[in-house]
Amino acid sequence: MAWAEWEQLKADAADRGSTQMQLNKAGPAGSGRKQGDLVVNHTDLSAVREEASKLHGRLWKEARVAVPISETAASDLTTQGLELGRALQHVADRWDKQLKSLSDACGHISNHMDFTKYVHDGDDQYVRSSVSSIATLDQGFDDDYAPKGKRNKADN
């Protein structure tokens, strides 16, 4: 891009009243944020993480109580020669397997929400540092920084 072309683009933008970078949409006026701030609301994600974490802890403590009792009853019934003992053992095994699967899923959800928050915070920091460097970059295109032979003739 030639220097004159850059100057023309800047003048066109100034005529439109848009010399600053704009995002698609900024927050509503009076929202407590500065115009153009990027915001990721973690409230919903935090609530999901908290509930998944609570459920993970409660599942093992409260739902697994049935497994040892059922296994003991199944063993007693089997010892007495009743087929019901094998059936009850099958139910206890199945319950334990499903409980572990559900508990793992809750732990995964909780951990994923923590990871998501960490990644978003990193992305926000990256965007913030990238956007703040645009003003510095724009200064490089001011007339004061133009090479000697490229300045506007009116400035000489």
Image: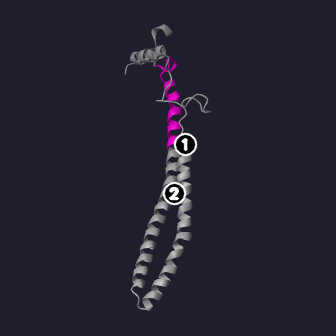
- Quick check: 87 left or right of 38? left
In the image, 72 versus 29, the foreground residue is 72
Q: Secondary structure at mark 1?
A: loop
The residue shown at (56%, 55%) is 50
Do residues under tags 1 and 2 come within 8 Å of each other at their CB atoms? no
Q: How many marks?
A: 2
Identity, as a three-letter code, of the amino acid under mark 2? Ser
Crowd rating for badge 2 (residues with CA inside 10 Å; few <14, some 14–19, many 20+): many
Q: Quadrant of residue 61?
A: bottom right
Horizontal and vertical percent for residue 117? Answer: 52, 49
Helix or strand or loop: what does disc 2 sit on? helix
Q: On screen, 80 above or below 31?
A: below
Mark 2 lies on residue? 110
**Label 1 is placed on what type of residue?**
Asn
Which residue reaches farthest bottom?
A: 80
Nearest to the observer: residue 153 or residue 21: 21
Q: Which residues are magenta?
A: 123-146
Rendered location of residue 10, percent (x, y):
45, 18
Residue 156 appears anywhere in the view = no
Disc 1: CA contacts within 10 A as few (<14), some (14-19) or many (>=20): few
Residue 4 visible? yes
The quarter of the image holding the N terminus is top left
Q: Residue at x 56, y 46 (%)?
A: 43
Residue 41: numbered disc: 1
Name the residue nearer the viewer: 141 or 130: 130
Image coords of residue 37 (percent x, y): 55, 33
Question: What distance separates the C-alpha of mark 1 from that of mark 2?
Answer: 17 Å
Q: Residue furthest top?
A: 154
Q: Residue furthest left?
A: 1
